């Protein structure tokens, strides 16, 4: 295999824009070393892959073998479950990267995700406990929102803790009336003026006042 090309990005003054990352600084999700994991995969592919069937309920095997497995053995996940210490879904591949020795270990296997549709790429670092936010309209790039989960929880807990909290807590409504600190206000008309002999409006509030015009009397 040819030696991979190594590059470093610098500004016009020759200062590195991004520091060089060494192999031991890059870790897998389970905390392992990426360089070591890649080396194990290269060795496994070089030795040959053997399709052993499916794993899970109704599969070739219910669970990964606890002994006797060999580097290069591969299973396809048939049903959701935890295999080799990792949560897996149907279609994922589980590849043995280390032949069984004296004791079985989850690290003897690696899971190759087969159903990632739109993976989201996050920032190189973020504040612990901060909420995630999208960076741009693509929906596949994330950034640190700068808002912590504890701040959000605190804001929710204090949503009525202000000068008018007691007044707001004393307000209730049922669609026809509004009650504020024990006093009821009706939604209908409070005052109406009708013609002589006219009908009282149907929307009058209980206790409302109606003024009825008096018909003109005979001329003096």
Image (cartoon, helix red, strand yellow):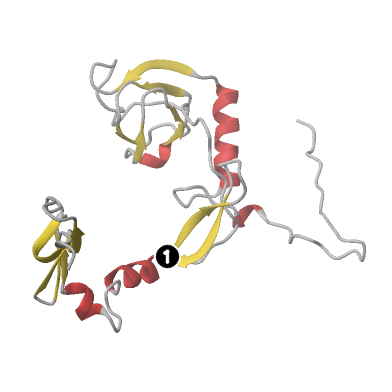
- The picture places residue 119, in percent across and down from the top left corner, at 53, 38
Write the residue at 13% across / 57% down: 204
- Residue depicted at x 22% and y 74%: 168
Q: Residue furthest bottom?
A: 163
Q: In terms of depth relative to the viewer, which is nearer, 138 or 197?
A: 197
Asked which quadrant contains residue 21, the reply is bottom right
Report the residue marked by disc 1: 129
Q: Residues within 10 Å of mark 1 (few under 14, many from 20)?
A: few
**Residue found farthest to the right:** 12
Count every numbered label the image shows and give the total: 1
Which residue is found at the position 92% from the left and 66% from the top? 13
Q: Taking the image as drawn, is residue 174 in sight?
A: no
Coordinates of residue 128 in the picture (x, y in percent): 46, 66
Q: Give the left or right position of residue 176, taking residue 131 as reference.
A: left
Residue in the foreground of this view, choosing between 216 and 177: 216
**What secondary structure is marked by label 1?**
loop
Looking at the picture, tell me which residue is in the foreground, 90 or 207.
Answer: 207
Kindly indicate the quadrant of the structure image that contains residue 44.
top right
Quadrant in which the C terminus is drawn = bottom left
């Amino acid at each position: 295999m040819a030696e991979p090309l190594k590059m470093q990005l610098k500004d016009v003054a020759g200062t590195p824009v991004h520091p060089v990352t060494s192999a031991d600084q890059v870790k897998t999700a389970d905390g392992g070393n990426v360089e070591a994991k890649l080396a194990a995969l290269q060795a496994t592919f070089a030795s040959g892959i053997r399709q052993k069937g499916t794993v899970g309920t109704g599969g070739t095997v219910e669970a990964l073998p606890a002994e006797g497995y060999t580097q290069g053995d591969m299973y396809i996940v048939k049903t959701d479950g935890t295999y080799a210490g990792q949560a897996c879904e149907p279609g994922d591949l589980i590849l043995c990267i280390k032949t069984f020795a004296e004791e079985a270990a989850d690290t003897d296997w690696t899971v190759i995700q087969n159903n990632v549709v739109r993976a989201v790429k996050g920032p190189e670092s973020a504040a612990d406990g901060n909420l995630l936010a999208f960076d741009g309209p693509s929906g596949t790039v994330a950034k640190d929102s700068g808002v912590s989960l504890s701040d959000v929880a605190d804001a929710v807990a204090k949503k009525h803790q202000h000068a008018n909290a007691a007044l707001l807590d004393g307000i209730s409504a049922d669609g026809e009336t509004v009650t504020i600190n024990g006093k009821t206000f009706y939604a209908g008309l409070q005052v109406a003026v009708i013609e002589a002999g006219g009908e009282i409006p149907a929307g009058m509030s209980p206790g409302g006042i109606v003024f009825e015009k008096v018909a003109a009397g005979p001329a003096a």
